[in-house]
Amino acid sequence: MDEYQIMSLLMRLETRDADPQTVAMMYAETLADASERLTDDQMRRFLICGAYLCHGGKRNAGGPASVDGADPELRSRIQLN
């Protein structure tokens, strides 16, 4: 699956009734299962994305979180190459 297919699926998934704590736990469990196969840089990227979704989702209730929508200080600290 390529990045465009993944993005398409992400945009279509309904998450209205999802409990944020449950989603965060599921993300952590899934990442822990895959962690041995990830480089340090890949792990860092997943952790940045997960943290932003956890924290950014609260600020952007009702819409997807995006790095572009982040405050300038946060954008300057997040470097997703």
Image: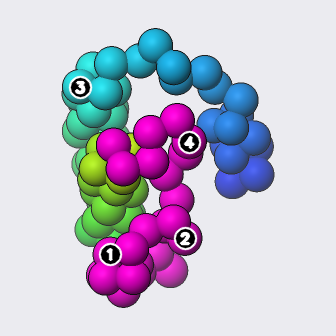
Packing grade of label 4 (10 A; few <14, some 14-19, many >=20) is few
Q: Quadrant of residue 77?
A: bottom left
| For residue 48, above or below residue 6 | below
Residue bearing the label numbered 2: 68
CB under 8 Å between callouts 4 and 1? no
Residue in the foreground of this view, choosing between 21 and 70 = 70
| For residue 14, above or below residue 33 | above
Residue bearing the label numbered 4: 63
Structural distance between the alpha carbons of marks 3 and 1:
22 Å
CB under 8 Å between callouts 2 and 1? no
Q: Residue at x 63, y 37 (%)?
A: 10
Q: Position of residue 36 (x, y in %)?
A: 26, 48
Structural distance between the alpha carbons of marks 2 and 1:
10 Å
Structural distance between the alpha carbons of marks 4 and 2:
13 Å
Q: Amino acid at mark 1?
A: Leu
N-terminal label among 4 and 2: 4
Q: Secondary structure at mark 1?
A: helix
N-terminal label among 4 and 1: 4
Structural distance between the alpha carbons of marks 4 and 1:
18 Å
Q: Quadrant of residue 54?
A: top left
Q: Per the image, is 77 magenta?
A: yes
Q: Position of residue 5 (x, y in %)?
A: 76, 43
Left/right placement of residue 7 relative to residue 53 reads: right
N-terminal label among 3 and 1: 3
Structural distance between the alpha carbons of marks 4 and 3:
17 Å
Stretch of the chain drawn in magenta: 58-81
CB under 8 Å between callouts 4 and 2? no
